[in-house]
Image (cartoon, rainbow, N blue to C red):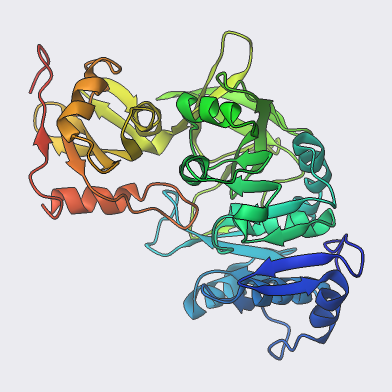
Amino acid sequence: MSGWLGGAGDHVALEFGGRRVRYDELARLVAGAVLPAGDGPIGCRDGDHPVDTVVTVLAALDRSRPVLVGGDAHDLGRLAAEAPAGTELALATSGSTAIDGRPRIVVRTAASWLESVAPLARLAGLGADDRIGITGPLTATMHLFALLHALAIGATATDEVATATALHATPTRLTRLLGGAHVPRTAIVAGGVLPGAVRAQAAARGVRLVEYYGAAELSFVLAARHGSGPAALEPFPGVEVDLRPAEAGLELWARSPFLALGVIGGRFRRDDAGFATVGDLVERTADGGIRVLGRGDTAIVTAGATVLAEDVEAHLAGLPGVRDAAVVGEPHALLGERVVAVLDLEPGTSLAEVVDAARGLLGPVELPRRWFPGPIPRTGSGKPARGVLREEILAGRRGAGHPEPVAGAPR
């Protein structure tokens, strides 16, 4: 099955929603799948049962039909009209690089994912005996890859997190899981900055963290296996990185066999040497590693200084009583932009107390000028939907906020 089914015939491949499928059964389902007529791309809709999505994806790959995961009929038409030669997998994904109001469609070969299967398995210590927890929808790139990766190494992919020996999760999802009764022995984490307090909590519960940085367009770029200390990321096996000066700082470029072919409806910068970037900014750590600061286009320029939203979010998420945090910039006549925070608080936590604690953690430039309580919308990949939040704040749908001017700073 295009190299993706690595398990023994009677071993369980998938357990989702109470539905259990062995590897031999999955192979038969893929071989017998009825696909739409013709040779054009095939779509998997958001909301399809995970087993049905897997069968469609593998059947399309076996029959050399491009397959789109996520999106709608319009996006399927865009794929049919604009897909570059060699496209096998296409993933509709939200993100800041979209340019036409529609989801970006990241297009790639199956080999660009298959080649990273063995390096990730070695890094995370995963094998056929593992039960791999999938903690989000398959329309999110990291979760679809996590499931296909589990199949390729012959493991069981499941949504039963309580029985998982390892799982893939965003920092927000991991934080919630660490508050529960069951935690796996290994957590593979991506999709945002992991607060130090969460690392410490994972270490205290005996969870081995495998943190990586990647993007839908780049796949794996950096990775580290670590305990409770700060993560010093290094290039993922098989990846070359180049840190290039940009207006907001050092920009991360990568070259590897894992890169996508391109992006339909989005920006994907690639140079003549084969390096590509999505605009993420980084810095060198004291021990020579690399720390990802965040997407350059999430930078907030306030009073002539540049503040990275993801950096502030990581600090705020580590404060007691804060379940989740998102930071955006809003227009300001004097400052250009001012930093605004939205916090999802534990019951009984006072917003004023959290603001006081933040004053001792953040400098005057980084400290948000306005604060809003409430839930934080997220994209399908688990990242804060900052565009939605910004629109809600500007339209007044989040209320007046909690003004907190910084002493000695311009208002």
* Residue 241 falls left or right of residue 229: right
Q: Position of residue 6 (x, y in %)?
A: 88, 60
| 279 and 205: which is toward the camera | 205
The quarter in which the C terminus is drawn is top left
- Residue 110 seen: no
Q: Residue at x 80, y 39 (%)?
A: 119
The outermost residue toward the right is 8
* Residue 393 falls left or right of residue 289: left
Q: Residue at x 80, y 81 (%)?
A: 29
The outermost residue toward the front is 181
Q: Position of residue 377 (x, y in %)?
A: 33, 54
Q: Residue at x 68, y 81 (%)?
A: 40
| 302 and 223: which is toward the camera | 223
Q: Residue at x 84, y 78 (%)?
A: 25
Asked where in the image residue 94 lies, by quadrant, the reply is bottom left
- Count of labels shown? 0
Asked where in the image residue 242 lies, by quadrant, the reply is top right
The quarter in which the N terminus is drawn is bottom right
| 290 and 347: which is toward the camera | 347
Q: Position of residue 235 (x, y in %)?
A: 70, 28
Q: Position of residue 219 (x, y in %)?
A: 65, 45
The answer to whether 342 is drawn above or below residue 235 in the figure is below
| 385 and 301: which is toward the camera | 385
* Residue 185 falls left or right of residue 353: right
The answer to whether 353 is drawn above or below residue 131 in the figure is above
- Residue 376 seen: yes
